[in-house]
Image (tube, coloured by chain):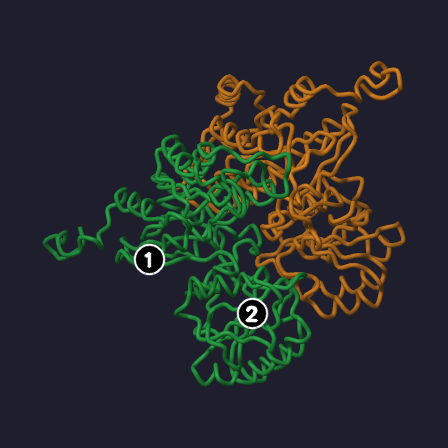
Chain colours: A green, B orange
Amino acid sequence: MPNTLALSAPYVIFLGDVPSAVYAKTAYGIAQWAPEKCLAQHRFAGCEIDAGLPDMSIAAAVAAGAKSLVIGSAPVGGAIQANWVPTLLDAIAAGLDIVSGLHTKLTDYPELRDAAEQHSVRLIDVRVPPTDLPVGNGKKRTGKRLLTVGTDCSVGKKYTALAIANGLAESGVNCDFRATGQTGIMIAGSGMPIDSVVCDFTAGAAETLSPDNHPAHWDIVEGQGSLFTPAYAGVSLGLLHGSQPDALVICHDPLRDHIVGCPNHPIPSLQTCIETNLLMARLTNPAVQAVGVSLNTSKVPADQRLALLSQLSSETGLPCVDPIIDGVQPIIDRLLASFASPTRCLNKAKDKDGEIA
Amino acid sequence: MPNTLALSAPYVIFLGDVPSAVYAKTAYGIAQWAPEKCLAQHRFAGCEIDAGLPDMSIAAAVAAGAKSLVIGSAPVGGAIQANWVPTLLDAIAAGLDIVSGLHTKLTDYPELRDAAEQHSVRLIDVRVPPTDLPVGNGKKRTGKRLLTVGTDCSVGKKYTALAIANGLAESGVNCDFRATGQTGIMIAGSGMPIDSVVCDFTAGAAETLSPDNHPAHWDIVEGQGSLFTPAYAGVSLGLLHGSQPDALVICHDPLRDHIVGCPNHPIPSLQTCIETNLLMARLTNPAVQAVGVSLNTSKVPADQRLALLSQLSSETGLPCVDPIIDGVQPIIDRLLASFASPTRCLNKAKDKDGEIA
């Protein structure tokens, strides 16, 4: 796809000396959601964190076909660690692209830059957006799009989008997960780091991420931020407008009482969040619908969980699930019921000229 | 002010060989709105465009106290012209900062960069935002803020904000025009090029632009874009949230039928624009009010103008003016009537401890 990041798989996931699972969330996320892209993990001697992949040396991974070394460890401070550099240089010399989502850029390290140039491999900082992004134009594109939105940051927008994309694919629906954050990009192998785009181009970047497609194709777009976060609502609105979603899934943590980092900003009600997102989304897709609610119920007492889901479902008129506990099938069912899906009746619905009706 | 651009006045405005007034809008804007900052203009032999300032050589302008050469010409393509370079180098050698709002950056020209370093002057590209901007936090700040918003781009948001700031100052109200675009920044001598900020920081940049101030002080913030432009609504929302305006003035072109560049997107009604801006603005200022409508009636037949203003005023319940024809006093009157203004009763309203009530 032009103008989005594109990574080369399969990956060897670099764990190095990561001291705890907390700092290896990237590795776990990739191993969980993109196992077909993960050939191996590479750990230093003594590292006890395990993403569940075969351990390989760089040489062995390259011999087995690896194309990229993906840094799966995120240390405090977000910098490349000095003791990683020899391994990264080995990987570069062996012909691997290096992929990083850390705050400091690979390209800020002259020794990595020089080696990458010498060996004609890429240093890919997935926080750095592509250049030459267009401004948005708001034109209707072909194909269908679902966007996950939320009442706040960190309420499951990426997880929910991945689960829906996987479920749709299992149902035989032609679809793509469209990543907008660094871990998502590593999982998808491509995407757009939307929150790093200069704001004049945010909507245009989102348009680029989900281009024209087959009328029955679904792009499942990973949401970012929330229209209710004082810091990031502009990012969310640019992504909403550029994605021109047909369907929205609202992600929510029912026990959170204020926006992360903003103690004076209460979490909006689900209903307010749904209505505001629909209102703003209509600018680029007047037919937008909400099709489900995805809840993080991990802290809800077990004996109250089902009652809460039932209550919120009744209040919103939408299927409500915890995607980790319940899965997302009820949302997928609602989505497919709400939208005519030519792929599901390809053999029945051709008109006289053989075109899809 | 930390973290915003700050220019050194007085200026010599560089017109060079600008061939027509169309390309000299920046120069005219600065001369009109910041005459106190404009010491001189500098034109090449034969240039017939006149911003109404004294013509001076670079040496004469420096001798008269100029601190910056501000490029007031915007050629097609937005690049520094080769035949300007000797003059820019002269200005640098004479100790002037060079200020540009062109698309291509001053700092992309090695000969200018080297000369600036040698002579310890600044090359200031006003499209380049300051570094180390914070993310937004949504905290209420002291002081009052007015933001101009619009039904589209290019509907008078800068002009209206400048006219209101001037009018308030003439009424003795303590206020500042806060610039968010390149010409505005040159006029104000400081500001934030909001649409060039990485989108994660847009709201934080807007917060930085109008910091805590005296409770009776007004910041009059130049709006950008519109919540109804598919390309730029995210910029507008970040600016709206970060500005946390107490008052909104809605700018509108009553004869435009679609969003610039988006033929399938009709211009919203004034009422829809007001309601949507108020709804979204309440996230960071629940007490926000609309205080006026600023119309561009230049293409409205003269015999229909007053009827139109009257009709829209009646529909919105707000004073409606064309700021160029009618001035903005009715909006200022509404603003001052709507907000208690301690500066206007400083000597009456002190409590026992001498604090302002």
Mark 1–mark 2 contact, CB under 8 Å? no
Tell me: B186 left or right of A62: right
Q: Is residue A233 above or below residue A180?
A: above
- Badge 2 crowding class, 10 Å Cα cut-off, few under 14, some 14 to 19, many 20 or more, is many
Tell me: B79 left or right of A159: right
Q: Residue furthest left?
A: A352
Can you tell which quarter of the image residue A122 is in? bottom right
Q: What element does badge 1 sit on?
A: strand
- Mark 1 to mark 2 CA distance (whole Å): 27 Å
For the point 18% across and 54% down, which residue is it? A356
The chain containing the residue under callout 1 comes to A
Q: Which residue is mark 1?
A: A175
The circle on residue A71 is: 2
Mark 2 is on which residue type?
Ile
Q: What element does badge 2 sit on?
A: strand
Do the residues at discs 1 and 2 belong to one chain? yes
The chain containing the residue under callout 2 comes to A
Mark 1 is on which residue type?
Cys
Q: Is residue A327 above or below residue A41?
A: above
Tell me: A226 left or right of B101: left
Image location (x, y in percent) of residue B340: 72, 19
Q: Can the viewer see residue A147 in this picture?
A: yes
